Amino acid sequence: MASKVDMVRAATKLLVMVVFLGSLMIWTMTPTNTYRQIWLPKIRTQLNSTYFGLQGPTILIYTFPILFMAVLGCIYLHLGKKENDYKALESINGGKQRLALWKKPMVVKGPLGIVSSIELGFFTMFIALLVWSLSTYIHNSFATITPKSAAEDGEQVWEAKLDSIALRLGLVGNICLVFLFFPVARGSSLLPLFGLTSEASIKYHIWLGHLVMAFFTAHGICYIVYWVATNNISEMVEWSKTGISNVAGEVSLLAGLAMWATTIPRIRRKFFELFFYTHYLYIIFMFFFVLHVGISYACTMLPGFYLFLVDRYLRFLQSRQCVHLVSARVLPCETIELNFSKTPGLKYNPTSILFVNVPSISNMQWHPFTITSNSNLEPEKLSVMIKTEGSWSKKLHQMLSSSNPIDRLQVSVEGPYGPASTHFLRYDTLVMVSGGSGITPFISVIRELIYASTIEKCKTPQIILICSFKKSSDLTMLDLLLPIAGSPNELSNLKIQIEAYVTREKQQPAKEQNSKLGRALWFKPNPTDSPISSILGPNSWIWLAVVISASFIIFLILIGIIGRYYIYPIDHNTNKVFSNSLKSFLHMLVMCVCIAATASVAVIWNKKRNAQEANQIQNLEVSTPTGSPLPSSFYNADRELESLPYQSLVQSTNVHYGERPDLKRMLFDLKGSGVGVLVCGPKKMRHEVATICSSGLADNLHFESISFSCINGRKQRLALLKKPMLVKGPLGIVSCIELGFFTMFIALLVWSLYAYLHNSFATITPKSAAEDGEQVWEAMLDSTAFWLGVVGNICQVFLFFPVARGSSLLPLFGLTSEASIKYHIWLGHLVMVFFTAHGIGYIVYWVATNNITQMVEWSKTGISNVAGEVSLLAGLALWATTIPRIRRKFFELFFYTHYLYIIFMFFFVLHVGISYACTMLPGFYLFLVDRYLRFLQSRKCVPLVSARILPCETIELNFSKTPGLKYNPTSILYVNVPSISKLQWHPFTITSNSNLEPEKLSVMIKTEGSWSKKLNQMLSSSNPIDRLQVSVEGPYGPASTHFLRHDALAMVSGGSGITPFISVIRELIYASTIVKCKTPQIILICAFKNSSDLTMLDLLLPIAGSPNELSNLKIQIEAYVTREKQQPTTEQNSKLVRALWFKPNPTDSPISSILGTNSWLWLAVVISSSFIIFLILIGIITRYYIYPIDHNTNRVFSNSLKSFLHMLVMCVCIAATASLAVIWNKKQNAQEANQIQNLEVSTPTGFYNADRELESLPYQSLVQSTNVHYGERPDLKRMLVDLKGSSVGLMVCGPKKMRHEVATVCSSGLADNLHFESISFSW
């Protein structure tokens, strides 16, 4: 029986090879004239049909053979499950593996990675095919291009050849695309035919992807150059109904370029989530590619993508169901073993992998882990090992190792996926080299050999395991080498030698230090969970063949019906032509429906058997007694944890401390004719082993690398995108995502200017210029000046969004107005550059054409030049004061000059007219709404309850507020003191917490400028004032905080930069004491000039009477006094804090939101209602005032007056609706204010007890957490790099040099766990 199966398998594989070689022959002949002019016309004549049209022959030649091979592969693999591999392999044990020499590494270091001889050979042949195809295409094409043929098409010869090259580059790129999707079909039936797995074939996908994008990018660039050269740039926006759809091709290429950019090794490693999620653009890439070339030609690359879709949909169906996680084992080395329930019929081979998803950690992230269990030894169990090295695995470890462990964990899986067969028994000796968690795949190999030696009684190779670990605690990973107790784990028939190396410890630790044991967790069964099973049942390969063949047959039938009875009648019986794009879309839709339908039916059909097996297992679990460990060998946790390899493998294990393995010596000393060498670990280790095997000094070494480094989920989602990319430069500190958006915005401006100028210059000829009395260069200068202004307006569209402090748009993108000021600065510079160039261009043009009088023209119907000049002069005045040196030295000048924005915008609208000005209206409209609401809030005085004057010339102002006013940490408040200046408003960070102090709002002011010094003099004089009139705007701040997301929170401050961190610490105090949340460890690194500045730490804790206990808060304060060498004496530092209390004024009202507690809803009402009223009023004015003048009289309504009316109505509508909203909400604010004022009259001690407040100083309550360093600066690089935790939030606020230093550390790549955020108000 076995011989018959072998014969059928051999015949099947032979047939596959014949079909494969035939397909390669077709691809080789495709570029030739023989194929195109002789073979293809004959085939189309024979197969021409009303059912399939032109794609019929393409499907037969290119699609059918590959799908036929896939079906034959399924049969071959199904038959392979029937035979016993062990006896067959034992018969050739001791001989060299077939083609072993071909599999040796040929290239180790280089862009291709580790490449064997056979891989290099196939790669060379594939490159030869591409070169042959491109050269043949171009040679045959150039033969038909002559000066005469080019002239007939209105082209030069080089342009016709460029057109031909561009087309042929796309054709050759499609050859690469044919093979692109085969390696990423994890459940493929083709890869195992060639001894490959999906994971091992990822590098082929990478190679092919680079080739595809190189050819397609060259294809696109050549066509753009060709269209520019032939003045056919409009072809870029053509969507042909019957031919090539250029727009679709451009969209496809852009999606491909986005994917390609993220595959750059540095970007992929540092920003893996970006790489991972960007790859979903393959949907757009493929969809628009098919629309671009049409379904007839797309059928050439259909087979690989078709098989990928089948595999992807089956994986989707499997991932929808939750699987039963039975238990977990937590090892001391921060390693987890997850044990799942599986159906006995599910079989897999060693080194197989399982993709795991834990929705409670992330719904999107799927991580591959090597299976450590053996399906023969453990028929109802499947185990994976997870080393806690990334944020995802660390979160899982925290969940399982906490003092209150969970009793159930929802998990979904995809897989298992692995090799179709194993070849370990073919060797005399099997050497496995691992680094760290790279030992995982070798656990499954050893368990497989245990089964072969004990159950199958096969002769097994000698095993040498060379494993390197960083710490001795990692040696506990060896605990998993043997299967669970109760399984046949005798080693008497297995020759094994383990050489373990602990590289970072010099000697064996004491037993007390290494006495921590593993911990087992058992999870409650859930009836909805099902054991892991093959999605297509035990006969999965047969069912996959059925799905592929049935779906394709149904696809052909449906497409034939649609082609015959829908497309054909339109094409041949009417005057219309059926759209190519619609035809392609219908084919793709039908293909997806056929795959989904047949796969779903197959899964449902097999679900019954899986359900029966699941019920059997669940019944076994239900019958398990709850009070003791489960009786079966599957669940005996106590016995499992006691069978440690340290006890059972002690005679076979040698542990070496403080050294690394000498792999060269160890591998060269190995004896035997066939030595299999498996390596899994860091890239450097794999390259070292590959170099040894490829050196030729040991011909008996047969190399195989196991690596899953291409799939790495260690980084927090989008966290790395926010890391600083640029630190020093004109843009300041810029993150990767900011740099990306900035680059795209600049690209938009360049593209817009280029397109405007190109289209404009195309219409300028010597004749047209002469008709206008100009020279060509003058006409071009006129056009350039105009389009510079138009592009400048694109920048102005976005200019006002960042400065709307109460914006509802910025929080949608996780931004605040303060953090977005830099975007306003960037946009402002761009606006003024373009508008200045626009103005200078027109002045030069007027001078050149003797029309300088145009400068004083105020046109009634067109452009008003005078208005534009006034607007530009106002803008230049604004721009001049933004020069950093002027802004720092003359801040008041900078501040007051910025009010010229009113003149700038007013005359800009008069200059261009309201019709065009509406393009930039949205941002300015929202700014006006925000500005008027701020104006209304600033008109009322707020009660300043008290002030606290610290010895370091720092003031804390304490205001009364309504309890309904909520704000987040790091929020700011704008303060105005009319007695100092009625116009100056200064932003200060709020130090209080709205949860801990519901009726109080505090800000801290460091006396560093003239305004703050005047305030300090008023409050610290010998005759202090008893009342201070103050107005405020705000608070403004982030919509949400993310402090609790991190394991640790490091805050670096310089001087008064500690202010925002006071509010952060108070928020964490509230979270830990009231909400009882788990809070991150806090590291506060603060630098001060003088020891008196240490009194700013007095504000870290809230006032007495609030819950300020720090027992639940882990805090460490490192304070540095840079200008004093030693701690001052008590007499020198005896100056105390001083408190002032102010008399309440009945006219003052506590700080509250100007639009009440539901401020966001009221803001929506104000925006929408004001705009609707604006449209109604403008419509009435236009219909009954402007229109009659324009059409019923001989007059023309002035553009300037029309623009003025629109601006006036807009301002009136905003003012009216905002005022009504504020008045409506004023009643509720007044009620809360009365309650607080009554409370103030009685003065409870909890709010106003100064003595008690001043006594609770951090010097007393935080003394154990605070280290003060005199005469030195913090070594930020060392301190930040040494921070532990998978996610460390890093906030910095202080001088520019400090912010840059911290940003440089974060962007260096020395510590990937740091998530940077800069807080700066230095502008």
Image: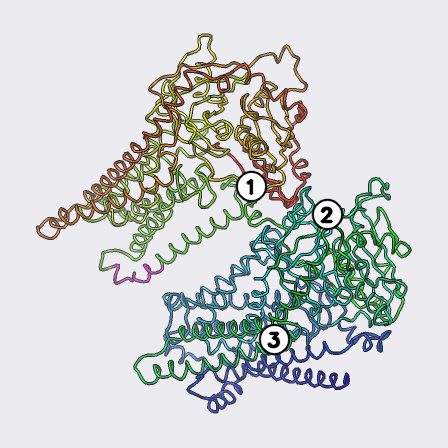
955 is higher (above) or lower (below) than 133:
above
> Element under label 2?
loop
How far is the residue under mark 3 from the one under mark 1? 54 Å
Label whose residue precedes the other's in the sequence (2 or 1): 2
Label whose residue precedes the other's in the sequence (2 or 3): 2
Q: Magenta part mainly helix, strand or loop?
A: helix
* Lateral position of residue 57 relative to residue 424, left or right: left
* Lateral position of residue 590 relative to residue 65, left or right: left
Residue 353 drawn at (x, y percent)? 68, 63
On whether residue 1057 falls in the magenta region, the answer is: no
Residue behind mark 2: 334
Amino acid type of the residue that numbered disc 2 sits on in the rendered structure: Glu
Residue 551 drawn at (x, y percent)? 53, 77
How many marks overall?
3
Residue behind mark 3: 544
- Where residue 1096 sits, quadrant-wise, is top right
Q: Report the magenta residues as a range.
A: 758-769
Closest to the camera, between mark 2 and mark 1, is 2
- Front residue of 177/72: it is 72
